[in-house]
Image (spheres, rainbow, N blue to C red):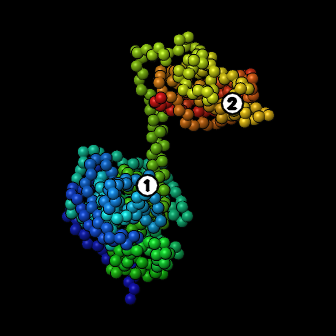
């Protein structure tokens, strides 16, 4: 008789749980090495695994001890390869498959740094859950390291949809996951919500086994997968029945395993995550893509922070180097003085002279000659100065003005972005392009300016530009 869903609560000794304080803010590693062996789920290969302690800021790295030189690959989203049915890491010709269960076990205990040595291209699948590795970690304990954790927090909600899968991330002061899973026809729809800690990991998640639907098995075998799969390490769903060699460990074991996978995949952020993740029918692909979007938001927020950080106090006592200080007064600068602060040269220098600088404003000119090289192709019978070069002229004058004002000599102004760009009239050979710039913001190394280009007093183009001051 085929067993149906029922509860059989797992038994796991938790005498050491209290030593894993979820409020500990220092980074963690394991106290002693751990070793165990088994089969890879998809490869079917026999594999030995060793989990070794690592120092602060080392991260989680997989080491292939079966390959020459024992190459390593960092557990990070930058190294994610295939995400079909499992998550793999790729570095050059080296691949490591099905890393999510090992990563989930480490994240469940809050472990930030460890070396995972394996003797094949896939860790042991065990019984299809993370129970065995979790028991071993609990037996040796964790070791606080001197450096603090640096969690990732999100400032604005994120939402991602890929087919039937939907993932949303909301700001939260801990790591919480709420998940709904179901089959393609809606069978075994399950829901579970949990805030991750070592206690909830041991009690609610680490026992949940991987599962698949019976009609998927043939395709998986044809694709060379699940060579090590059996009812010893997976649960199979056939129609409305559950095929398993033991009673289900939770009434909603399937959705709990989905959460286990999310934990493992999002640990590839490389830092602990503080957010509330809401997932509907998640997959490894959307898990990893959400992680990339979280990293992108963190990057954009950091740029914004840098933009609005007050600039450093400039020491006005030392005078600028004579070779960098224009010699004919503060108002106007000839081409040789311009070239001391603007790194561009023929054929890309779009400023011939700065007529005037006054406060946060500057006026410069570019004499447009028929000898400009771009007129050979733009256009041979109807020469017109490309609009993007007018935009470049605006950026060059704005960068010149910021470097001049802040006395950031030996620095370059790197063009970052342009907004509200408009081209109104063509610029032809013989015209004198007058570039008028006004600096709007200077925050740290980021500058923003508004610029217009004029010919005979009429605006021919305009834009708002952002640029970064960097080392030459």
Q: Residue furthest top?
A: 328
Image point (44%, 78%), residue name: 237
Q: Measured from the top left, where is residue 70 in percent x and y?
A: 32, 56
Observer able to see residue 132: no
Q: Is residue 102 above or below residue 6?
A: above
Observer able to see residue 124: yes
Near-viewer residue (232 or 91): 91
Q: Is residue 331 left or right of residue 110?
A: right
Q: Measured from the top left, where is residue 466 in percent x and y?
A: 55, 33
Q: Is residue 327 above or below residue 387?
A: above
How far, Cα to Cα, is label 1 from label 2? Answer: 42 Å
The residue carrying mark 1 is 92
Image point (40%, 58%), residue name: 94
Q: Is residue 210 left or right of residue 304?
A: left
Image point (66%, 23%), residue name: 366
Question: How many numbered badges does the structure rendering display?
Answer: 2
Q: Measured from the top left, where is residue 133 in percent x and y?
A: 28, 65
Q: Residue furthest bottom?
A: 1
Image point (71%, 24%), residue name: 369
Callout 1 secondary element: loop
The mark that comes first in sequence, 1 or 2, is 1
Label 2 packing within 10 angstroms: few (<14), some (14-19), many (20+): few
The residue carrying mark 2 is 373
Q: Measured from the top left, where is residue 378 in percent x and y?
A: 73, 35
Q: Is residue 327 above or below residue 362?
A: above
Occupied quadrant, residue 429: top right
Image quadrant holding the N terminus, namely bottom left
């Amino acid at each position: 008789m085929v067993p149906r869903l029922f509860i059989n609560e797992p038994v796991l000794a938790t005498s050491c749980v209290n030593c894993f304080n979820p409020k500990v803010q220092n980074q963690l590693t394991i106290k002693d090495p751990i070793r165990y062996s088994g089969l890879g789920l998809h490869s079917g290969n026999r594999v030995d695994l060793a989990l070794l302690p690592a120092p602060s800021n080392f991260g989680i790295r997989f080491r292939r001890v079966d390959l020459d030189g024992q190459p390593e690959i960092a557990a990070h989203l930058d190294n994610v390869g295939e995400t079909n049915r499992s998550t793999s890491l790729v570095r050059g010709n080296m691949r490591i498959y099905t890393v999510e269960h090992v990563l989930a076990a480490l994240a469940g205990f809050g472990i930030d740094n460890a070396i995972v040595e394996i003797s094949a291209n896939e860790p042991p699948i065990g019984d299809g859950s993370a129970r065995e590795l979790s028991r071993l970690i609990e037996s040796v304990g964790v070791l606080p390291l001197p450096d603090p954790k640096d969690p990732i927090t999100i400032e604005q909600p994120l939402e991602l949809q890929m087919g039937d899968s939907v993932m949303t991330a909301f700001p939260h002061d801990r790591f919480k996951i709420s998940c709904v899973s179901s089959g393609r026809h809606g069978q075994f729809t399950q829901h579970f919500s949990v805030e991750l800690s070592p206690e909830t990991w041991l009690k609610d998640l680490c026992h949940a086994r991987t599962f698949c639907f019976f009609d998927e098995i043939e395709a998986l075998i044809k694709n060379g997968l699940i060579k090590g799969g059996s009812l010893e390490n997976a649960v199979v769903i056939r129609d409305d029945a559950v095929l398993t060699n033991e009673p289900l460990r939770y009434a909603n074991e399937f959705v709990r395993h989905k959460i286990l996978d999310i934990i493992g995949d999002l640990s590839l952020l490389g830092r602990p995550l503080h957010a509330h993740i809401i997932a509907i029918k998640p997959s490894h692909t959307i898990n990893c893509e959400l992680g990339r979007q979280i990293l992108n938001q963190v990057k954009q927020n950091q740029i914004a922070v840098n933009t609005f950080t007050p600039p450093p106090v400039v020491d006005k006592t030392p005078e600028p180097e004579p070779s960098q200080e224009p010699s004919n007064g503060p108002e106007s600068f000839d081409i040789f003085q311009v070239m001391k602060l603007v790194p561009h040269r023929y054929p890309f220098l779009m400023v011939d002279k700065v007529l005037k600088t006054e406060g946060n404003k500057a006026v410069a000119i570019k004499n447009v000659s028929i000898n400009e090289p771009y007129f050979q192709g733009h256009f041979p019978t109807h020469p017109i100065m490309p609009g993007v070069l007018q935009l470049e002229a605006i950026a060059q004058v704005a960068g010149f003005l910021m470097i001049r004002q802040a006395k950031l000599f030996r620095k370059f102004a790197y063009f970052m972005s342009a907004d509200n760009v408009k081209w109104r009239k063509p610029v032809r050979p013989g015209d004198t392009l007058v570039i008028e710039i006004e600096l709007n913001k200077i925050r740290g190394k980021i500058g923003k300016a508004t610029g217009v280009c004029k010919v005979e007093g009429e605006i021919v183009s305009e834009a708002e530009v952002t640029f970064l001051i960097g080392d030459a």
